[in-house]
Image (tube, rainbow, N blue to C red):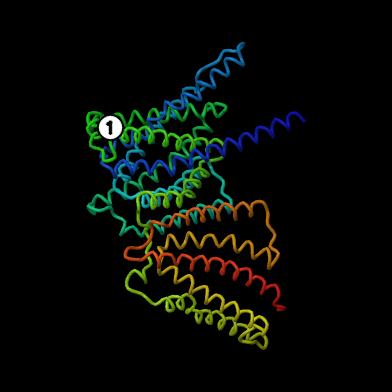
Amino acid sequence: MAEMETQTMTATLKRVLLLINIILLSVGNCGGPLVMRLYFLHGGKRVWFSSWLETAGWPVVLLPITIGYLHRRRTQPSSPTKFFFIKPPLFMASAVIGILTGFDDYIYAYGMARLPVSTSALIIASQLAFTAGFAFVLVKQKFTSYSINAVFLLTLGAAVLGLHTDNDRPKGESNREYVLGFLMTVGAAALYGFILPLVELAYKKGKQEMSYALVMEIQMFMCLFATLFATVGMLVNNDFKVIGREARKFELGEGRYYVLVVGSALIWQCFFLGVIGVIFCASSLLSAIIIAVLLPVTEILAVIFYKENPLLGRLYFIHGGRRVWLSSWLLTAAWPVILLPIRVTYLRCRHISPAKFFFIKPPVFIAAAIIGVITGFNNYLYTYGQACLLVSTTSLIIATSLAFTAGFAFLLVMQKFTSYSINAVVLLTIEAGVLALHTSSDGPKNESQRVHARIFHDAGSISLYGFVLPLVKLTYKKANQ
């Protein structure tokens, strides 16, 4: 009984620890690129210095390590207490991974100096595919249908968005610099996709019992060697000599320059500590999935703070289209295409028994007609909003339709909810809702606030389509066919 209680307590503590590390990872993953881009936007030019800051906060980890050591010495006075648990094999692995991390930091900082945060975040999200591949090769990661779907969809979504980067180039930047920054960021994504499973492999092959205290030591030594790698680059590039001059010329002021430097080091340390903590509590794949899931948060923060333009445009309306009714008509105008599979099915069945071209009966036909009319009105509302808002804004607002669909599904078809589905609905809706609130700075140029206020058309479209989906399900149930 006592053993079962201990196991339960251990599992609970591990979940709490996982949650804490996810929070740390979230803070670092979203805040790190923003503070780094802030440095380059306001006069910072030193790529090696910027990469050095990503891991220079490693001494912070000494604080919890010291507290843990003092606690062990006080509670276990009879046994010898070591300050560090790490042994030579894990120390060597940490050193190698740290050097790789230092190189990865440099090419990432190089890309960040030349790309907007939104574009860089999209490219970095593709590391999920690299992490999945290397995790399978290095640590024999087992995949379920859910994890495969997550990897495929998140990577595909980031890749599709990443293809549309032809209009996001910062002003005054040459095509060569932009392409080089793009390729460097892709390289950073691939290399970090290799580093994450490598850390997990080190845990497995380290010949030591893993504890969170040991994990923090590994993190500290990884960042120490990454910082040493960047320090060599700074010495060669004479970065240390120009920091003072750069601080005096910094557009936000010398004081804020040093605040930014210290803040950057601390925020990035949250990222690295969160990453290795998630790997310890779960897997390298989960850490990569969390990084990819946080993509829209980084994107919207870049739009809010730096007024970056999202990558996808409203092609028809941007290039002279003005007909809202025509655009809404196009959403469903391809319906005759469905006649082809219906015709093929009819021809196949005709040789077996007397076959009808259509199976639909009057009650279902009337229901389909009503739902079709409602859908047509919904399409108009949606298209009107699309004509006035950016695609990114529209997509965020439309995403909140999940809550309406869940509510109407419960009322119309008695949808049953589990704790998982409730959590999914609540969290996804809150995320989309919070992002959608920050739309004050995304109004297209030359568009009046009155037109931009037609955001309520999209809100109407959300609620209406949230009603249409369960209505279709209800029709299936009540069809008597």
Q: Nearer the viewer, residue 326 or 141?
A: 326
Determine the residue positioned at 33% across, 30% down.
229
Residue 88 position in % (x across, y down): 46, 22
**Residue lying farthest front?**
450
Q: Is residue 107 left or right of residue 31?
A: left
Q: Is residue 337 above or below residue 23?
A: below
- Say which residue label 1 marks: 233
Q: Is residue 176 above or below residue 386?
A: above
Residue 202 position in % (x across, y down): 49, 32
Query: Disc 1 residue type?
Result: Gly
Q: Is residue 369 left or right of residue 324?
A: right
Determine the residue positioned at 61% across, 38% down.
15
Q: Nearer the viewer, residue 311 or 222?
A: 311
For mark 1, does the 10 Å Cα neighbourhood hold few (<14), some (14 to 19), or many (20 or more) residues?
some
Q: In terms of image quadrants, where is residue 411? A: bottom right
Q: Is residue 273 above or below residue 38?
A: above
Residue 246 position in % (x across, y down): 24, 35
Q: Quadrant of the N terminus?
A: top right
Determine the residue positioned at 52% across, 76% down.
377
Q: Nearer the viewer, residue 325 or 52?
A: 325
Q: Is residue 53 left or right of residue 356?
A: left
Q: Nearer the viewer, residue 421 or 404?
A: 404
Residue 150 position in % (x across, y down): 53, 53
